[in-house]
Amino acid sequence: MILIPKYITEKLPALYAMENEKDPMVICKFFCPWTKWTWYAIEFDGNDTFFGYVVGDYNELGYFSLSELQQVKGPYGLRVERDLHFELQPLSVIKKLHE
């Protein structure tokens, strides 16, 4: 699976473009099917670095990289996946899902 096809990168604002938005839109979602780890992308540098909401041991806004997501390997060959059915949502909605 291609984690970030061109039509998604075209929707993602550049890094820092949304920093003054009170409730930015989350554009896409990546997840580990074998854990609770989930990454919600808000911005992308067009190369490797995302800014978004990360759900893991602690839920937080931060940076994560495409190359790291592509390198993660789980049991039975499982990999990080992009949620093909994810629809754009405000960050506030995503945060409420993970309270």
Image (cartoon, grey):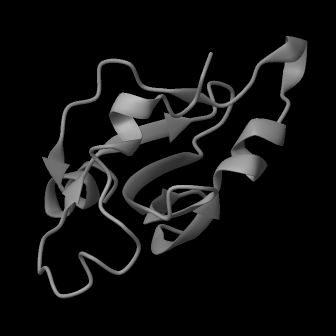
Residue 57 seen in the current view: no
Left or right: where does residue 20 sit relative to residue 95? left
Instruction: Please say if 62 is above or below 29.
Output: below
Residue 96 seen in the current view: yes
Left or right: where does residue 18 sit relative to residue 62? left
Viewport quadrant of the N terminus: top right
- Residue nearest the observer in this picture, 87 or 99: 87
- Residue nearest the observer in this picture, 39 or 48: 48
- Residue nearest the observer in this picture, 24 or 5: 5
Left or right: where does residue 92 sit relative to residue 28? left
Identify the residue at the far bottom of this view: 20
Residue found 64% across the figure and 57% down from its top: 48
Residue found 55% across the figure and 35% down from its top: 31
- Residue nearest the observer in this picture, 62 or 17: 17
- For the image shown, how many numbered marks are present on the structure? 0
Instruction: Please say if 69 is above or below 53.
Output: above
How far across and how far down the image is residue 87, in percent?
Answer: 20, 31
Identify the residue at the far top of this view: 76
What is the quadrant of residue 76 in the picture? Answer: top right
How far across and how far down the image is residue 40, in percent?
Answer: 41, 51
Residue found 46% across the figure and 73% down from its top: 60
Instruction: Please say if 34 is above or below 18.
Output: above
Viewport quadrant of the C terminus: bottom left
Residue found 32% across the figure and 52% down from its top: 12
What is the quadrant of residue 42 in the picture? Answer: bottom left
What is the quadrant of residue 53 in the picture? Answer: bottom left
Instruction: Please say if 60 is above or below 78.
Output: below
How far across and how far down the image is residue 83, in percent?
Answer: 42, 25
